[in-house]
Amino acid sequence: MNFSIDKISVLLDRHNKAELPEDGRSRAAVAMVLRQGECGVELLFIQRAKHEKDPWSGNIAFPGGKALQGEGLRQAAERETAEEIGLDLAEALYLGRMPEVVGSYLPVRVTCFVYWLPGPPGRLELNYEVFDIFWAGLNDIIAAESQILSTVNFGGEAFETPAINLLWPGAPVLWGLTYRLTRQFIDSCLLC
């Protein structure tokens, strides 16, 4: 599949950007960071550090987190990305935002902001919330063999869910909110 900045900007502009009505859920924002890799467009993922109090402990995610009181969602995504991995998104090209998604298991609403990194990110410094970072090729992510059903554990329960099998050794599968945002983005690209 051929991805380009222009194509991505157009598809993001087509999305309905209206926010969901207020429903008492926590507000969070994440950054989907893209770059041109050796084999095509790549997407930045983090693997969260393992912490007993973190419901997404050890999972694959985008950098981001809860918005602070009075903070805009895009500001929250950019602040959290800088705090978690040391990436200043002021150096990136802002492409737009995805429609909000709501958590299936926790009361959270997440808005995803999309950025294009025009050059190497420089040295990234991970904070205590992040175990590691990975760049994954969009073509690898959409490959049929990457689409799986996987048994995952959440809240002390095991269940089967759609997931993406990522290609780096030892990586957990991509599932949940990050999976849904990634699929939403890719499915939109496929329709363009």
Image (tube, rainbow, N blue to C red):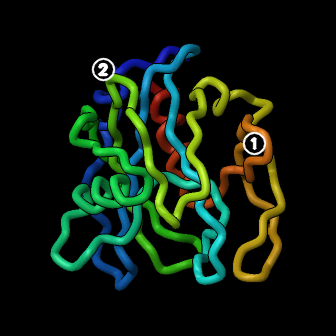
| Closest to the observer, 55 or 87 | 87
What amino acid does circle 1 point to?
Asn
Q: Is residue 30 above or below residue 167?
A: below
Q: Position of residue 169 (x, y in %)?
A: 78, 40
**Disc 2 versus disc 1: nearer the observer:** 1
Q: Quadrant of residue 148?
A: top right
Q: Residue at x 52, y 65 (%)?
A: 129
Q: Position of residue 132 (x, y in %)?
A: 60, 50
Which residue carries the number 1 mark? 165
Disc 2 is placed on an element classified as helix
Asked if labels 1 and 2 touch by Cβ distance under 8 angstroms, the answer is no
Q: Residue at x 58, y 77 (%)?
A: 54
Horizontal relation, residue 190 to residue 50: left or right: left
Disc 1 is placed on an element classified as loop
Q: Residue at x 56, y 45 (%)?
A: 133
Q: Residues within 10 Å of mark 1 (few under 14, many from 20)?
A: many
- Residue 13 in view: no
- Residue 9 in view: yes
- Name the quarter where the N terminus is drawn: top right
Horizontal relation, residue 5 to residue 45: left or right: left
| Closest to the observer, 128 or 66 | 128
Q: Quadrant of residue 4?
A: top left
Q: Position of residue 90 (x, y in %)?
A: 21, 41
- Name the quarter where the C terminus is drawn: top left
Q: Quadrant of residue 73?
A: bottom left
Which residue carries the number 2 mark? 6
| Closest to the observer, 15 or 41 | 41
Q: Residue at x 32, y 24 (%)?
A: 118
Horizontal relation, residue 48 to residue 70: left or right: right
Q: Label 2 to label 1, Cα distance in Å? A: 28 Å
